[in-house]
Structures are given as structure tokens and as C-alpha cells.
Amino acid sequence: MAQITLTHEEAATLRGVLNSYVSDLRMEVADTDSQPFRENLKREEAMLKKILQQLDAELAAPGTSS
């Protein structure tokens, strides 16, 4: 398993960028006609949402360093 260490500010920035990308990705999924490509985009979206949940949990954890 890969691990990276981020400061609170870096994690918050990454969360913002990922949220923006996931929003754009949803529009791309809606506009895609190719079913295989759409499925790949949906898998990517699910993976990024899981990462966002992990970031949210870390940022909300008491004692998170800054």
C-alpha cells in the first residue's frame, strides 16, 4: 500500500482540487456516448470519491497536525 504524508494545508488543497475534478468528471460521464469509456470514468469517479472520504476523515481527526 502506498502512503504519502501531507500537511493539513496540503491535504485541504488536494481535497479542493479533487472535488473540482470529480465535479467535472460527472459532466464528462453525462456527455459520453461510449459505454466502455463511461464505465471507466465511473470507476475513476468512485475511486476519487473514496480518496476524498479518506482525506475528509483525516482532516476532521482531532490532533491533525498543521
Image (cartoon, helix red, strand yellow):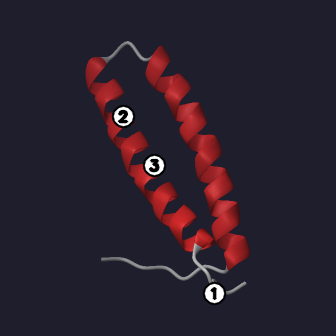
Task: Give the structural element (helix, strand or loop) at label 3.
Answer: helix
Give yes or no for contact between labels 2 and 3 (Cβ–Cβ under 8 Å).
no
Question: What's the residue type where badge 2 is placed?
Answer: Lys
Say which residue appears at 42% left-offset and 79% top-offset.
Answer: 3
Determine which residue is flagged by label 2.
42
Circle nearer the viewer, 1 or 3: 1
How far is disc 1 from disc 3 in space, using C-alphas?
24 Å
- Earlier along the polypeptide chain: callout 1 or callout 3? 3
Q: Where is residue 22, by image quadrant?
A: top right
27 relative position to 36: left or right: right
Q: Which of 21 and 62 lies nearest the eye of the viewer?
A: 62
Q: Residues within 10 Å of mark 1 (few under 14, many from 20)?
A: few
Determine which residue is flagged by label 3.
49
Q: Residues within 10 Å of mark 2 (few under 14, many from 20)?
A: some
Say which residue appears at 49% left-offset and 15% top-offset.
Answer: 31
Disc number at residue 63? 1
Task: Give the structural element (helix, strand or loop) at label 1.
Answer: loop
Give yes or no for contact between labels 2 and 1 (Cβ–Cβ under 8 Å).
no
User: Can you give x and y, in whole percent of width and height, for residue 27 in the image?
Assistant: 55, 24
